[in-house]
Amino acid sequence: MNNENNTSKKNFLEIINKFKTGIGLLILVIVLSFLSPYFLAIPNVLNIIRQVSIIAIVSFGMTMVILTGGIDLSVGSMLAFSGAITAGMMVNSGLNVFLAILIGLAAGTALGFFNGLAVAKAKLPAFIVTLAMMTIARGFTLIYTDGRPISGFNETFRFFGAGYLGRIPIPVVIMFIFLIIIYILLKKTPLGRYIYAIGGNETATKLSGINTDKIKIAVYALNGFLASVSGIILTSRLNSAQPMSGEGYELDAIAAVVLGGTSLSGGSGTVIGTIVGALIIAVLNNGLNLLNVSSFYQLVAKGAVILLAVFLDRKSQQ
């Protein structure tokens, strides 16, 4: 009888642990719905999912980087750089919208590729490499824009950030497309298995004949690409390429990934958990805004959430 009770208790705790992020999101939604009558209003819900789409796409790339045991502090700066390049190609150079977008995506991917090259080939710490890139990419953005926003886009470009498919915002559609792609990549392809293997035990993975350097470079390049996608969506939504856009996005992305259950040590986590973590960040930001909480206190709350996420990650590793 005691064995049955212990087994039932263990199974219950395993279920709670598996869905703890989703349960946390549900509790947060319930609390905020009581605190603000506007929280569950359809316009506000659409606003939340539109906001979460940008940080979620960045977080998908961050998930893969952290799964390999790495980190990327430069995603916010790469986002701003790609958005500025895309805007400049359209407004200053007069290029076609789609060609400008391709150039913007290539620019961010190239920065991510450089990060991967420095980490994999030069064996530099990912923290230092991406910290340097955070500053370099932000500097490139300020140089390119001369420190001023670029605006004046046509309706075709505006559609990517402000358009709708029925009642669903286009950024949300794009987010779900990439969610499916990254989910399949991680769960159904050899590349995904190698990403998990590197985070679990890089030395053993290398000894098994897998080129871990190529995998790392691909992961960081893909991370740069996804940051670029978010940068282009944000630029389109704001109808302006702001040289300082994306500041703090690296912290939001890391928080979303860790809240979603991905271990900072690598080798464990899912992109589904990441989107739930991103929703927690977005819901928290939105709820605090509705409650007229000062932005200063919001920073404290966000920092506390990140600290809690890291604490829970460490506890789960013990």
Image (cartoon, rainbow, N blue to C red):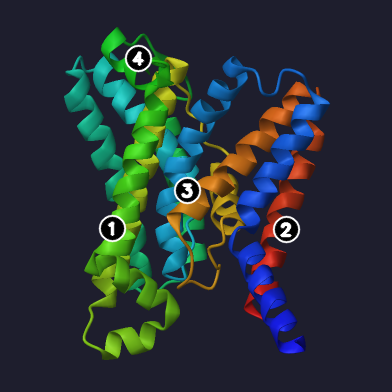
Q: What label sits on residue 158 in the rendered view?
A: 4
Q: How many angstroms separate mark 4 from mark 1 (CA)?
A: 29 Å
Q: How many angstroms separate mark 3 from mark 4 (CA)?
A: 23 Å
User: Picture quarter containing residue 195?
Assistant: bottom left
Q: In terms of sequence position, does the residue under pointer 4 or pointer 1 come before the other?
A: 4
Nearer the observer, disc 3 or disc 1?
Answer: 1
**Residue 188 in view (yes/no):** yes
Residue at left 29%, top 48%? 181
Disc 3: CA contacts within 10 A as few (<14), some (14-19) or many (>=20) = many
For the C terminus, give its image quadrant: bottom right
The image shows residue 107, relative to residue 213, as above or below, that is above
Q: In terms of sequence position, does the residue under pointer 3 or pointer 1 come before the other?
A: 3
In the visual, does 49 lie left or right of 8?
A: left
Residue occupied by mark 2:
307
Q: Amino acid at mark 1?
A: Leu
Residue occupied by mark 3:
59
Q: Amino acid at mark 2?
A: Leu
Residue at left 64%, top 73%? 11
Residue 254, position as x, y percentages in the image: 56, 53
Depth check, front residue: 107 or 193: 193
Q: How many angstroms separate mark 3 from mark 1 (CA)?
A: 15 Å
Disc 1: CA contacts within 10 A as few (<14), some (14-19) or many (>=20) = some
